[in-house]
Amino acid sequence: MKCDEMQLALESEIHMRQTSYPEEPLLVGAAESIWGGSDVLINIGIDVGEKLIAWMRGYLPDVLESVFITDSDIRHIKRNHGSNEEERGQRTIVPQDFACIPTVLNEFDSCEHTDTDKLGNKKFLLRKDIGGDVYLVTIQRGKRKLQIKTMWKETRSGASC
């Protein structure tokens, strides 16, 4: 499938989902800006639902209030997952993929605690199958907030997440 066809298929999938999130256009616009070379400072808060809040109760000392992503995180995703991902068995992230972040956070298929660094920061990996692509988002805890650190996607194989 060509890049333009993939983008159209993704946009179609996003429009077909029953739940849409108000942050979707803001996330896509921020990613488009970064992909276009902007050095604008970005900090976008994403509302979280009860599913993620409940899951995080066992790991965070306080109740989770929000998740955020910054321009630095978006640049990291672009630099590390925005081209030639097929060579690593993944799919290249494009700005339109950022619209999936609220869905991954609020409707995840799985969430696992993957690491705790020497400062005590816990890292989590969330997975969500959206239209045959599995989106993976890594988040790291703050006090009552989680920060998105990276995102990538893989084509779903015969096994489910």
Image: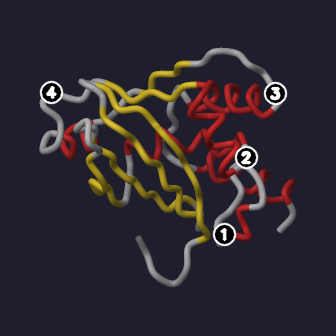
* Mark 4 to mark 3 CA distance (whole Å): 37 Å
> Disc 4 designates what residue?
62
Identify which residue, 151 or 28, lies in the foreground.
Answer: 151
> Disc 3 designates what residue?
37
What is the residue that sits farthest to the front in this orientation? Answer: 118
Residue 23 place in picture, x, y as percent: 54, 27
Q: Residues within 10 Å of mark 4 (few under 14, many from 20)?
A: few
Amino acid beneath label 2: Val
In the rendered structure, are the residues bearing label 2 and label 4 in contact, judged by CB atoms less than 8 Å apart?
no
Q: Residue at x 17, y 28 (%)?
A: 63
The image shows residue 36, relative to residue 90, as above or below, that is: above
* Mark 1 to mark 4 CA distance (whole Å): 37 Å
What is the residue that sits farthest to the bottom in this orientation? Answer: 158
Secondary structure of residue under mark 4: loop
Earlier residue among tags 3 and 2: 3
Q: Residue at x 61, y 25 (%)?
A: 71
Earlier residue among tags 1 and 4: 4
Identify which residue, 107 or 87, lies in the foreground.
Answer: 87
- The dot on residue 88 is 1
